[in-house]
Amino acid sequence: MNVAVLAYKNCLVSAVSGVLEIFSIANSISQDSNGDRFSGLSILSPDGEDVSGFVGIPLQVAGSLLDTRPDILIMPPVFGEVELLLENERLIKRIAELGEQGTILASVCAGSFLIAQAGLLDGKPSTTHWKLASDFSARFKDVDLQPRRMLIDGGGYICAGGAMAWQDLALHVVARFMGRDISSACAKTLVMDSTRDVQTPYFMFESKSLDEGFADKDILRVQTWMQENYSRSVSIKILAEQSGLGERTFLRRFKQVTGMTPNHYLQQFRIESARHLLEVSVKGVDEITALVGYDNPSSFRRLFKRMTGLSPREYRSRFSRVE
């Protein structure tokens, strides 16, 4: 399999070099076992010119994507305006051509925007960085976006979610084309976690507010109140009273501003608080349950796992900052 990474301005340099290094290590391991190997590992750019990656690190490229047809093309994360890439008609047309010709298109983070812009994800499941999900959905309404998932393999395309999910993508590509034994050996050699299935443990709740252009002071007043009182027993009646609106009007305007129902919004605050307590304290789960406003520890555990993909104990084990 001939593999190329597409480099563009402000791309994550560690992703560009990192996937190629993992493939090289896989080749070395496979050579010892007389297995298949990747070939032609290279870095390309849209026009064949060298590019400046994130924080200004230069990347020397081997040529232009317009003149090359790799078996696998990897599109790394970009820390900048993805709009400039989406407006590059020659690039998008070339990506579409490659997809139609059988090149496997593999993206990380915002890289999935390029495949979607080429029209190759319509009606298909896809993922991207959880923080880019709303923008992606607004742009590409025909794509079945599943932002909870870390990686989706659609055969002719592969999408990985978070910015550092290039590691998950590289190991997956190794497993798919060289076998799980080689992929597992790579993960062990590099001391990498090769078992991440979802992005949900990394989600951060970001509430929309007036600072982001929402000019509804009545709803902002309720948002502020909820942030300060999320552990209390709260009803729609109480929230509507805080806004000074009738219940029906409050519910409609709250959904318009936040994109959520009040109950879902409150639930997000509570789970975010629980995550913080699991990270920075040694409090037991039963105590945390009560502190964030829930009565039943068993129900809280189920809700926490549904929203984060991990049990409270698993979450603490992975993310605790307590020595």
Image (cartoon, grey):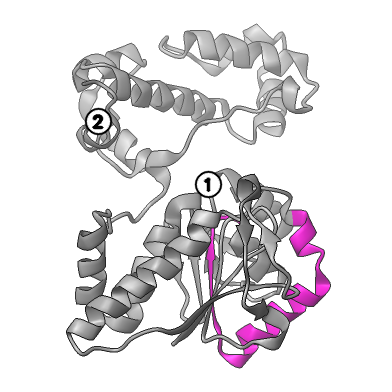
Residue neighbourhood size for the residue with mark 2, other residues' Cα within 10 Å, grouped as few (<14), some (14–19), many (≥20): many
Residue drawn at x 62%, y 92% is 101
Looking at the picture, how far across and down is residue 215, in whole percent? 80, 22
> What amino acid type is highlighted by mark number 2?
Arg
Of the pair 141 and 255, the residue shown nearer to us:
141
The vertical placement of 298 against 8, above or below, is above
* Residue that badge 1 annotates: 130
Q: Which residues are magenta?
A: 83-110
Which image quarter is the N terminus in? bottom left
In which image quadrant can residue 153 be found? bottom left
Looking at the picture, how far across and down is residue 104, in whole percent? 52, 81
**Can I make out residue 246 in this image?**
no
Which image quarter is the C terminus in? top left
> What amino acid type is highlighted by mark number 1?
Trp
Residue drawn at x 82%, y 64% is 87
Would you say 104 lies left or right of 279 here?
A: right
In which image quadrant can residue 82 be found? bottom right
Q: CA distance from mark 1 to mark 2?
A: 21 Å
Which element carries disc 1, helix, strand or loop? helix
In the rendered structure, find residue 316 and report the number of the disc placed on it. Answer: 2
**Can I make out residue 192 in this image?**
yes
Is residue 68 a member of the stretch shown in magenta? no
Of the pair 29 and 275, the residue shown nearer to us:
29
Looking at the picture, how far across and down is residue 276, in whole percent? 37, 22
Residue neighbourhood size for the residue with mark 1, other residues' Cα within 10 Å, grouped as few (<14), some (14–19), many (≥20): many
Which element carries disc 2, helix, strand or loop? helix
Q: Earlier in the sequence, mark 1 or mark 2?
A: 1
Looking at the picture, how far across and down is residue 303, in whole percent? 33, 35
Would you say 32 lies left or right of 239 here?
A: left
Residue drawn at x 65%, y 26% is 251
Name the magenta segment's main secondary structure.
helix
